[in-house]
């Protein structure tokens, strides 16, 4: 199935065949070859002379105009390289001992990282242990810590192009832990007011219900006089209903994406496979769906029960809802609270075949491996939990006409 | 630092391009990168943080940064702007509801000074899904025609599922970066 298989195997470094048109490829090849040869030539001649006019004295193929072009290209490359170097250098003011190839050394990064981490932890501890009632002072201290964390994060981002990925991951984990500690400290010291990192677009929290986001509207206005230049077609779906049972049966895999939105107190049953499922703005609904071969995106649901299987599930702005899932990857939640998870329990005639077709016939156990993007810590997120077995529905049987849930 | 040692360093980095992939969550960034690299795409979790892939493409070494697009972590994007040669903006062409979000986030990104020199490839992904908007429609919704005239950009329809369009997009991007940086003007 992968069309690129002819182009390589699953190694992490690999060649991709050039797909450029002949003409394009030639021009790239040409300049690239020139540039390499020029550098070699140049280095050679440089070792005997540093006069740039002698750079290409040994190269008979180049006319003077071309030489000039080469020189200017080299200058561009040198500038680009120097900028990268400078940018890196400014980040490591604390690190002065190593001068050989310090920028590309993992161990020097790690020791610098460890120092910064320690210093931030000290700042956090000091802040906690020496309380001050001056709220402006507290704010200054917290801002200062926040900017230290941002700097550290930037350092990682920058160095990660030579760091082994394990180091990158663990460094990022450390940073998110530090942020979390800061948020906790902030909550202790400045109750109620939500603290946010400096450059974060704090105002952009989205309101789910009606669009009152005037900032947003205005920004759109600047570049676009009318909302959209043409009518966006509606995808198949169930929308704007109250107190109904909505049923759809998909045959084969001709169905693409499906949308379930703006429902109140409804029950939805989807039998068969779909490619992608979008769900938003539901209240007090029960949603039963067969296998989704791509991803499910949920946004803004309250007091609902979902029973669904999919390759990926992203849950945003969910409140007080239960999810019975089968997922191939880790489900994620964001801006959600009081959500509970349990394993998939749907049954309809032919579901086994559909699940198999969508490669969802195996229980992966991922229904319990939820990542809360608002809680990137090793400690369990307070926003979600495993639904206690005693409270779970054992199996939900649906058909075209009938629906039955068996309690434990 | 002498010119000679700079040149030595350049020789090593000469063919390196740094490419930043961003876009809303669920748009298919990680799937695209794995597909290009010939890796298995059947189990991919939403990206927490970022992934880096080093891929040899033609004569170049691409350092591709695939950064998570969940709302919570979009504010981290700016940490990756520095030294970006190419920007890939991935759109889920079947996610009609969030096209406004998509346009806003792209607009914000393009205001960023540090990205002003980067070539921009817009991938209108998920073309295999029935009901997906075409690249032309996506271009209209994102109002690409109004883009700053100095920006090098291109929109390409693709599917990380079938692989269609990916090479076309990356060929253009690499070619465009190469012609900005390496070509003799
Ligand atoms: N049908 C179809 N599905 C796709 C395509 N590309 C990606 N997907 C699916 O879209 C979902 C999201 O893909 P990801 O690669 O995880 O998206 P992402 O942009 O990396 O998301 P974040 O990491 O959260 O920012 C997955 O379920 C993919 O299988 C495509 O071209 N066609
Ligand atoms: Mg991803």
Image (cartoon, coloured by chain):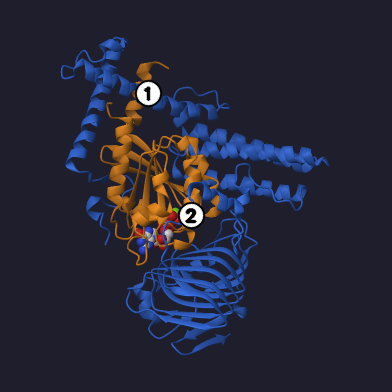
Chain colours: A blue, B orange
| Above/below status of A148 relative to A216 | above
Chain letter for mark 2: A
Horizontal and vertical percent for residue A171? Answer: 54, 43
> Does the beta carbon at disc 2 come under 8 Å from ligand 1?
no
- Under tag 2, what secondary structure? loop
For the residues labelled 2 and 1, the Cα–Cα distance comes to: 46 Å
Horizontal and vertical percent for residue A76? Answer: 36, 24
| Above/below status of A354 relative to B150 | below
Chain letter for mark 1: A
**Can you see residue B25?**
no
Horizontal and vertical percent for residue A93? Answer: 57, 26
Seen at 34% across and 67% down, the residue is B130
Q: Are marks 2 and 1 on the same chain?
A: yes
Q: Is residue B174 left or right of residue B146?
A: left
Horizontal and vertical percent for residue A381? Answer: 62, 60
Quarter of the figure that contains the C terminus of chain A: bottom right
- Under tag 1, what secondary structure? helix
Q: Quadrant of residue A385?
A: bottom right
Q: Quadrant of residue A1?
A: bottom left
| Numbered disc in front, either 2 or 1 | 2
Q: In the rendering, which numbered label is found on residue A78?
A: 1
Please name whichever residue, B110 or A347, is drawn nearer the observer in this view of the structure.
Answer: B110
Q: Is residue A388 left or right of residue B98?
A: right
Where is mark 2, residue-wise?
Answer: A226
Q: Is residue B1 left or right of residue A406?
A: left
């Amino acid at each position: 199935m992968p069309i690129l298989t002819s182009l390589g195997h699953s190694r992490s470094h690999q060649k991709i065949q050039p797909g450029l048109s002949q003409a394009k490829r030639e021009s790239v090849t040409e300049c690239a070859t020139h540039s390499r040869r020029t550098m070699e030539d140049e280095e050679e001649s440089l070792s005997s002379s540093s006069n740039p006019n002698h750079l290409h004295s040994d190269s008979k193929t180049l006319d003077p105009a071309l030489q000039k072009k080469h020189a200017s290209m080299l200058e561009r490359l040198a500038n680009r390289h120097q900028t990268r170097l400078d940018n890196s250098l400014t980040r490591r003011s604390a690190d002065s001992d190593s001068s050989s190839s310090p920028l590309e050394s993992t161990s020097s990064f790690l020791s610098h990282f460890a120092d910064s981490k320690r210093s931030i932890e000290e700042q956090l501890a000091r802040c906690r242990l020496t309380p001050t009632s001056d709220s402006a002072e507290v704010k200054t201290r917290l801002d200062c810590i926040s900017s230290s964390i941002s700097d550290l994060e930037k350092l990682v981002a920058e160095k990660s192009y030579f760091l082994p990925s394990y180091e990158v991951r663990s460094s990022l984990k450390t940073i998110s832990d530090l942020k979390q500690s800061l948020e906790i400290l902030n909550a202790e010291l400045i109750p109620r007011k939500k603290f946010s990192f400096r450059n974060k677009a704090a105002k952009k929290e989205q309101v789910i219900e009606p669009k009152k986001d005037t900032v947003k509207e205005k920004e759109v206005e600047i570049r676009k006089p009318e909302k959209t230049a043409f009518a966006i077609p509606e995808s198949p779906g169930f929308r704007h209903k109250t107190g109904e049972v909505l049923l759809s049966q998909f045959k084969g895999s001709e169905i693409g994406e499906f949308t379930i939105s703006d429902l109140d107190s409804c029950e939805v049953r989807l039998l068969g496979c779909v490619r992608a499922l979008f769900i938003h703005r539901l209240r007090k609904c029960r949603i039963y769906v067969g296998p989704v071969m791509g991803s499910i995106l949920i946004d803004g649901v309250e007091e609902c029960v979902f029973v669904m299987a999919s390759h990926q599930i992203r849950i945003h702005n969910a409140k007080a809802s239960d999810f019975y899932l089968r997922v191939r990857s880790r489900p994620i939640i964001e801006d959600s609270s009081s959500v509970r998870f349990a394993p998939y329990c749907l049954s309809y005639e032919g579901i086994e075949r559909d699940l198999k077709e969508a490669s969802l016939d195996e229980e992966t156990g991922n229904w319990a491996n939820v990542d809360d993007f608002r809680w990137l810590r090793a400690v369990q997120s307070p926003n979600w939990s495993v639904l206690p077995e005693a409270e779970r529905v054992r199996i939900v049987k649906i058909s075209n006409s009938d629906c039955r849930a068996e309690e434990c | 630092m002498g010119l000679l040692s700079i040149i030595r360093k350049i020789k090593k980095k000469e063919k390196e391009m740094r490419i930043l992939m961003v876009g809303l969550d669920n748009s298919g960034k990680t799937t695209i990168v794995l597909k290009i690299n010939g890796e298995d795409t059947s189990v991919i979790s939403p990206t927490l943080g970022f992934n880096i892939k080093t891929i040899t493409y033609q004569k170049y070494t691409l350092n591709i940064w695939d950064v998570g697009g969940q709302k919570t972590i979009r504010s981290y994007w700016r940490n990756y702007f520095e030294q970006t040669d190419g920007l890939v903006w991935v759109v889920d062409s079947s996610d009609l509801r969030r096209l406004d979000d998509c346009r806003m986030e792209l607009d914000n990104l393009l205001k960023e000074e540090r990205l002003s020199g980067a070539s921009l490839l817009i991938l209108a992904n998920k073309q295999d899904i029935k009901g997906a908007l075409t690249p032309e429609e996506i271009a209209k919704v994102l109002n690409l025609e109004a883009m700053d005239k100095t920006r090098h950009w291109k929109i390409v329809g693709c599917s990380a599922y079938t692989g269609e369009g990916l090479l076309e997009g990356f060929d253009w991007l690499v070619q465009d970066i190469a012609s900005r940086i390496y070509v003799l003007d």
